[in-house]
């Protein structure tokens, strides 16, 4: 099971004259970060809301909005007359200076921030429990989107790793031919510059073994195959939060690919190494979106 960090969730409920609307959007991020916009009535519960979001969503950059709307006159309101007078004085002065019309001033004032506010700054415990329920519905909706996208990510990552494994097999097939070419090239150079009859065959064999050991890539290929196998095992784990772990394994995969390319000293093998690097970069891009 794999989850993406990207998703969107929305939930809405209406009880009596009160409507609660929750929207949560999530993008990839290294840690848990949330930009929370809530109704003033919910300010005392901001910490609880943040905890509720983190418990399920774990990681990512979130934009969350929790609104409570009053559809009727069930909740009394207070008009901040001092603030309204200040707004009126400022707007009138500006309108006069700019020679603008001043009709319908009251309607404008009533829409300005904090001129009209609920008579009470708290909600009841029953109302808060209802808000919690709606938040959880939105989070569950977002989490379902994350899971759907995670399935696509998992399939793509598996494809990238299997491609690297197949290219690794190609490199293994070419490796013996590479060693033969190295041997032939060295023997040819010695015959050309020293003369074949002057070459000490025993010493040549020792030097060839030493040189080929320095160019040997068998250990790198074994480690590369092990890392790929471990990556697939992590993909199959039940834990949904494994993006960082997968990223660390890809770093090790990249290290073995780079070492193989630098030690191989062979154009044919290098072509397969380039293809491995291409698949690796695609996998790294996808892992950035994994929870």
Image (cartoon, grey):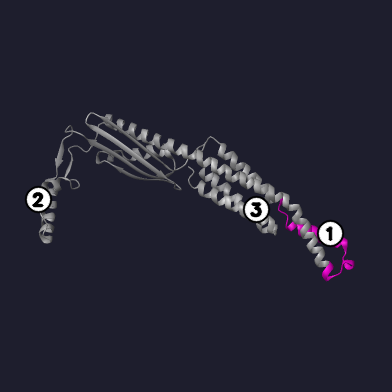
Q: Residue furthest bottom?
A: 193
Label 1 CA crowd tier, 10 Å (few <14, some 14–19, many 20+) = few
Residue 115 vertical placement versus 260 (above, below): above
| Residue range highlighted in magenta | 191-218
Which badge, 1 or 2, is on the more N-terminal residue? 2
Please identify the dominant SS of the magenta region.
helix
Query: Which residue is labeled 2 in the image?
Result: 103
Query: Which residue is labeled 1 in the image?
Result: 205
Residue 272, disc = 3
Element on which disc 2 rests: loop
Contact? badges 1 and 2 (CB < 8 Å): no
Element on which disc 3 rests: helix
Q: Residue 24 at x, y = what percent?
A: 36, 40
Q: Residue 161 at x, y = what percent?
A: 60, 45
Label 2 CA crowd tier, 10 Å (few <14, some 14–19, many 20+) = few
Q: Residue furthest right?
A: 197
* Label 1 – label 2 distance at C-alpha: 101 Å
Tag in front: 3 or 1 = 3
Q: Residue 116 at x, y = what percent?
A: 16, 43
Query: Which residue: 54% across, 40% down?
Result: 155
Q: Give the camera-side residue of 82 and 72.
A: 72
Which badge, 3 or 1, is on the more N-terminal residue? 1
């Amino acid at each position: 099971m794999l989850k993406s960090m990207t998703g969107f969730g929305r939930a809405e409920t209406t009880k009596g004259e009160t409507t609660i609307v929750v929207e949560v959007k999530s993008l990839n991020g290294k840690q848990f970060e949330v930009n929370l916009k809530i109704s003033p009535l919910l300010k005392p519960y901001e910490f609880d809301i943040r905890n509720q979001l983190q418990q399920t969503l774990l990681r990512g950059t979130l934009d969350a909005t929790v609104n409570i709307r009053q559809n009727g006159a069930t909740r009394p309101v207070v008009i901040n007359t001092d603030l309204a007078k200040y707004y009126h004085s400022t707007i009138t002065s500006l309108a006069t200076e700019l020679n603008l019309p001043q009709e319908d001033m009251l309607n404008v004032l009533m829409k300005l921030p904090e001129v009209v506010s609920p008579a009470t700054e708290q909600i009841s415990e029953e109302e808060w429990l209802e808000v919690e329920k709606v938040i959880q519905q939105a989070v569950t909706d977002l989490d379902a989107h994350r899971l759907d996208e995670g399935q696509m990510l998992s399939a793509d990552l598996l494809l990238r790793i299997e491609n690297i494994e197949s290219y690794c097999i190609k490199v293994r097939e070419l490796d013996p031919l590479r060693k033969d070419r190295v041997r032939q090239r060295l023997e040819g150079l010695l015959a050309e510059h020293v003369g074949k009859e002057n070459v000490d065959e025993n010493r040549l064999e020792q030097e060839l073994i030493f040189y080929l050991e320095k160019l040997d890539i068998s250990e790198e290929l074994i480690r590369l195959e092990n890392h790929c196998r471990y990556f697939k095992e992590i993909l199959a784990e039940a834990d949904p939060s494994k993006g960082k772990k997968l990223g660390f394994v890809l770093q090790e995969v990249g290290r073995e690919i780079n070492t193989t390319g630098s030690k191989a000293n062979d154009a044919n093998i290098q072509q397969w190494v380039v293809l491995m690097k291409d698949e690796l970069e695609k996998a790294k891009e996808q892992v950035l979106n994994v929870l």
